[in-house]
Image: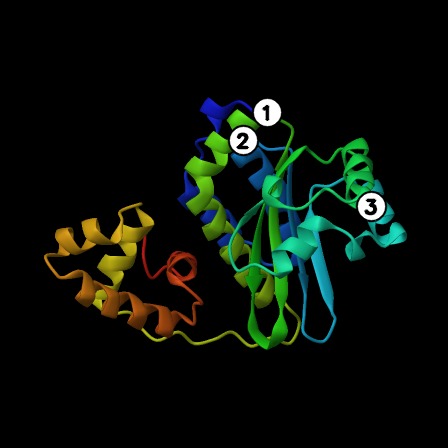
């Protein structure tokens, strides 16, 4: 990873996601994201409440086939760890101490999976569970700087990727979103630009309590599970523009 070059704006990447109009183009977007983020792999996978699955990404097809063949889903620390979490997970935080987990990791690395990973668990409608993962070969220091600086971007991308995959699901009717108020747009725009809540409240000359009311109202209108998800949906739908 050339850390200095990893500066593709989040807006450009979200625009690429928004333009996807089929699963084939969503696969192409995952390949573009790998280049934009300057990482080894970008992978997205979902399982619906009824058991239907969809995935795309840049792992070697031979590894995907082997993963399925060996039944690694049952022992994969990434899947097991993320299923129990609502927050992004750095793979270093997971339990790799078991013999099965260590053997799995060795097999993954042998098939081109990097030694570093960052996965965002997503829970969608009707029991849907998805994972958005970036993966790379590098040392701990470089990875910590990268994920620290791009954590927010990765969460936005994860939720936008999931929303696009849901939109492309056969038979799914698009949701009609309620219009955001001017104050809600201002608040989400400033949050998307990286300001914290205190800074946003100060810029808008309102209290943090009032800001919280605007954010919660926008989150409800957008059908978002949290503030980051609301920002991602607002960006994707063009409600805010950076």
Proximity of marks 2 and 1: CB atoms separated by less than 8 Å: yes
- Per the model, the C-alpha gap separating discs 2 and 3 is 25 Å
Label whose residue precedes the other's in the sequence (3 or 1): 3
Q: Residue 227 location in percent, x, y?
A: 37, 61
Q: Secondary structure at mark 2?
A: helix
Q: Which mark is residue 139?
A: 1
Q: Is residue 157 left or right of residue 171?
A: left
Q: Report crowding for label 3: few under 14, some 14 to 19, many 20 or more residues within 10 A (C-alpha).
A: some
> Going by the image, does 198 lie left or right of 19?
left
Which image quarter is the N terminus in? Answer: top right
Q: With 204 as the anchor, is 155 left or right in this view?
A: right
As helix, strand or loop, the secondary structure at mark 1 comes to loop
**Which residue is the site of mark 2?**
143
Q: Tell me the element at label 3.
A: helix
Marks 3 and 1, how far apart at CA: 24 Å
- In depth, the one of 126 and 238 nearer the eye is 126
Q: Which residue is mark 3?
A: 100
């Amino acid at each position: 990873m050339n850390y200095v070059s990893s500066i593709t704006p989040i807006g450009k990447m979200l625009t690429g996601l928004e333009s996807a109009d089929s699963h084939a183009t969503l696969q192409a977007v995952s390949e573009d994201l790998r280049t934009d983020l300057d990482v080894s792999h970008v992978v997205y996978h979902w399982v619906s409440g009824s058991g239907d699955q969809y995935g795309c990404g840049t792992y070697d097809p031979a590894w995907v086939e082997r993963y399925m063949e060996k039944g690694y889903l049952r022992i994969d620390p990434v899947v097991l760890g993320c299923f129990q979490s609502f927050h992004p997970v750095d793979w270093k935080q997971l339990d790799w101490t078991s013999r099965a987990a260590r053997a799995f990791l060795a097999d993954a690395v042998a098939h081109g999976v990097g030694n570093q990973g960052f996965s965002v668990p997503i829970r969608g409608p009707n029991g849907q569970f998805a994972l958005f993962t970036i993966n790379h070969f590098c040392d701990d220091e470089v990875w910590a700087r990268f994920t620290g600086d791009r954590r927010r971007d990765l969460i936005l991308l994860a939720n936008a990727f999931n929303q696009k995959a849901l939109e492309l699901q056969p038979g799914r009717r698009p949701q009609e979103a309620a219009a955001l108020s001017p104050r809600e747009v201002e608040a989400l725009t400033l949050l998307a630009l990286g300001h914290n809540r205190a800074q946003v409240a100060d810029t808008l000359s309102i209290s943090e309590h009032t800001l919280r009311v605007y954010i919660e109202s926008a989150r409800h209108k957008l059908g978002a599970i949290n503030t980051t998800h609301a920002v991602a949906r607002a960006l994707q739908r063009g409600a805010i523009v950076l």
